[in-house]
Image (cartoon, rainbow, N blue to C red):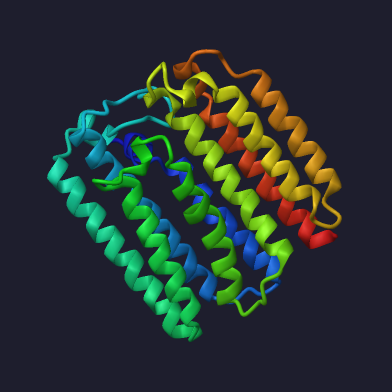
Amino acid sequence: MKIGEILKAAKVPLYFTSVAPVITAAVYAGIYNPIIFLILSVVIFMQAALNTSMDYYDFKFQRHLLNSDTLFPLGSYFIEKMNVKPETILKVSRILLAISTILGILVVIITKNIILLYFGLIAIFFALIYVMPPFRLGSRGIGEISTFVDFGIFPFIGSLIALGKNINFEDILIASSFGIFASMIRYLHHIAEDSDNSKRVRYFRMIYLILIFGVTLSLITINKLFFLDLLITIILIYHWLRLPKDKFGISRKTNEIVSVQILYTIMLIFTILFK
């Protein structure tokens, strides 16, 4: 197996969506406690468990591999391209989920904060209903609900709580901006799997534009972030204007929205440090 194929199959570039809120939370709180590395491990293993679970259920329910020539393939690259047995993928996903859960419990024990336990249980619940029958939100056109919570609200707010910071309205807005970015990435990436006649495909550009302005509204109410808000909004609108009309072409632009989130995170961190 080539390293490049393994990285593509594991969807490694998408892991930034998980770690960005945690790293930003540490900078935002101004607390560089080693606990942050443990939290990073929790979210990384959680996303790995979610990705491998999706691979298994995509294969099981015949959601075939798409965009295999890009960095962001849909479906199970491991199973269809690398001939890994579906049962092996399922076992790996369960092991990864168990590791994430154990590490999460360790965070709760170290911080002695029971709220984090509730956060973790709800996050696991959303992850499970995203991929597992009979819910399978990820294949029913409402998977963005899970991504908003698990890759936005909980990583950022949970990290702040673990670091001992009191939560205010500004914290929720920043967490929401990460959640909306995660939902945008998920929506654009998976649009190719939706039916041509679905409302998600027919009204994609309008819904996606609403998500873009969701990021704008989240930022515009945060003190001293006007320049970041303006620049990110301009970049997102430019990205939106350049999107192809067909759903497969749109999905192939996943690299663009992931790049925008990376830029946003870097700029947000610098803004926090120097405002």
Is residue 145 shown to the viewer in this render?
yes
Q: Where 23 falls versus 205 (above or below)? A: below
Is 46 in front, or is 61? 61
Tell whether 96 sits left or right of 141: left
Image quarter where the N terminus lies is top left
Q: Position of residue 171 (x, y in %)?
A: 69, 63
Residue at (41%, 35%) from the top-left corner? 141
Residue at (60%, 60%) from the top-left corner? 23
Q: Position of residue 237 (x, y in %)?
A: 71, 27
Q: Quadrant of residue 32?
A: bottom right
Tell whether 74 sits left or right of 176: left
Q: Position of residue 169 (x, y in %)?
A: 72, 64
Q: Where 124 falls versus 3 (above or below)? A: below
Q: Where 96 falls versus 246 (above or below)? A: below
Residue at (54%, 44%) from the top-left corner? 182
Is residue 252 shown to the viewer in this render?
no
Q: Position of residue 211 (x, y in %)?
A: 63, 37
Residue at (65%, 49%) from the top-left corner? 177
Image quarter where the C terminus lies is bottom right
Q: Quadrant of residue 273?
A: bottom right
Residue projecting furthest to the top:
245
